[in-house]
Image: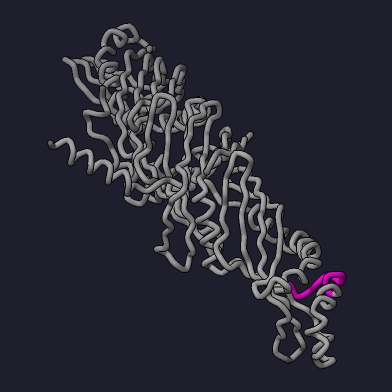
Amino acid sequence: MALFPALLLALLAGAHAELPGCKIRITSKALELVKQEGMRFLEQELETITIPDLRGKEGQFHYNITEVQVTELQLNSSELHFQPGQELILQITNASLGLRFRRQLAYWVFSDGGYINASAEGVSIRTGLQLSQDPTGRMKVSNLSCQAFVSRMHMTFGGTFGRLYDFLSTFIISGMRLLLNQQICPVLYHSGMILLNSLLDTVPVRSSVDELVGIDYSLLKDPVVSTDNLDMEFRGAFFPLAEGNWSFLNRAVEPQLQEQERMVYVAFSEFFFNSALESYFWAGAFRLSLEKMPKDLDMLLRATYFGSIVFLTPAEINSPLKLELQVTAPPRCTIKLSGTTVSVTASVSIYLVPPNLPEIQLSSMIMEARLSAKMALRGKALRAQLELSRFRIYSNQSALESLAMIPLQAPLKTVLQIGVMPMINERTWRGVQIPLPEGISFVREVVTNHAGFLTIGADLHFAKGLREVIEKNQPANTKDTQASSAPPPSTAAA
């Protein structure tokens, strides 16, 4: 009997779950590029390893090792892969470190000092990055596991007592291996938990698009990691900036991602575009006034409304005409296999504008238009190019007046194509940013339409190096942050 209530609760939870307006999939094909850029950054981080001084005594043998520096680092073999759950795994094998340090050695009454070179070989590192959603809806590295092990070290002692020190260096080698094992993981922990998260902080979550509208890219749940993909679901909703808590109900088809051929796929549902159109509508953006008419349209309008104009005063008759266009309801976007269209209904009013006198309305008509939209991804901005594909006007007063407006169809459509569409496209081609970190962009994109959503497949390109972006955005006081972010000792040493 307990099964039925549990099933009912699961169905209710699913019914109220918020649908994503945008999805992003990172495929395993992107990992090689990400690994190359990440390994360059990681090499630089490991070269900053700070190894404490090593002092000890074995019988009559005293040693003091100071000023340890990493002089060379070779990460010969590495692999980056997804691990089902929420993890990204980096495995480094057979790496080597070149070291230089100062030695002070004493045995009975003999002493020796100077600098010496050493090498740590057979270095193995395994790091797991756990990804999750933080309270603000941003993706974060929420945990980092690390295992590091140095299998062997070599040192060559010169000088008068070289052979003796070669025999006694076993104590030093053992101590240095232990110190290296303990120092590698704290560096990786800081790189992942602090520096990599500062890179993820550059992903827009809730930001303004322009002075009227903002966009919400909050994650709706933790990223899902499978063997081949990292999938993320975003709210993908626009909102008027004047209404900070504004929200639209998403009733659109949920976008689906099934492709694997490209490095990244982005899917947008009709809701993504409709929330933008509705936000701009309520923000008052869909109003337009044309006060300079083309000469042919001016003459045609005056002839059409001659019956209304003839009874006016000479000053009013010769005054300029003005056309006002105002969208009366939020436009609607429809995505089909054949393409993407935007339907618009607006009122069109014609006025005479005599100087220093009230405007005189000659006519008010209804315009219905359909725009075809071509989507493109440039850099990391989603852009749209609109084209007027269908247009008609009619009167909301009488059928007879609608017949009288038929001659206006063609010239008004021309005015929209020449005077209005370029202004709209200038704004839509600026685009809106996709939730990617700074320094990463899309290249070689392909747009595919589906029923109710569209997908864009692309490859990734690092326009900036990870170090450049991280150094620009990392916390101001990195030393304090690094100290507070050190992993437990049991994690640092394998």
x and y percentages locating residue 103 in the rendered image: 33, 22
- Front residue of 186/248: it is 248
Does 292 appear in magenta?
Answer: yes
Specify the farthest residue to the bottom: 313
Name the quarter where the N terminus is drawn: top left
- At x 24%, y 15%, the residue is 171
Quarter holding residue 393 = bottom right
Residue for point 50% across, 56% down: 275
* Residue 102 sits in quarter: top left
Point out the stretch of residues depicted in magenta: 290-298
The C terminus sits in image quarter: top left
461 left or right of 157 in image: right
Placement of 5 over or under 432, stated as above or below: above
- The residue under the point 68% across, 56% down is 425
What residue lies at 76% left-to-right and 59% top-to-bottom?
Answer: 417
Q: Position of residue 491 (x, y in %)?
A: 25, 29
Closer-to-camera residue (357/129): 357
**Residue 164 shows up from this direction:** yes
Residue 104 at x, y percent in the picture: 30, 23
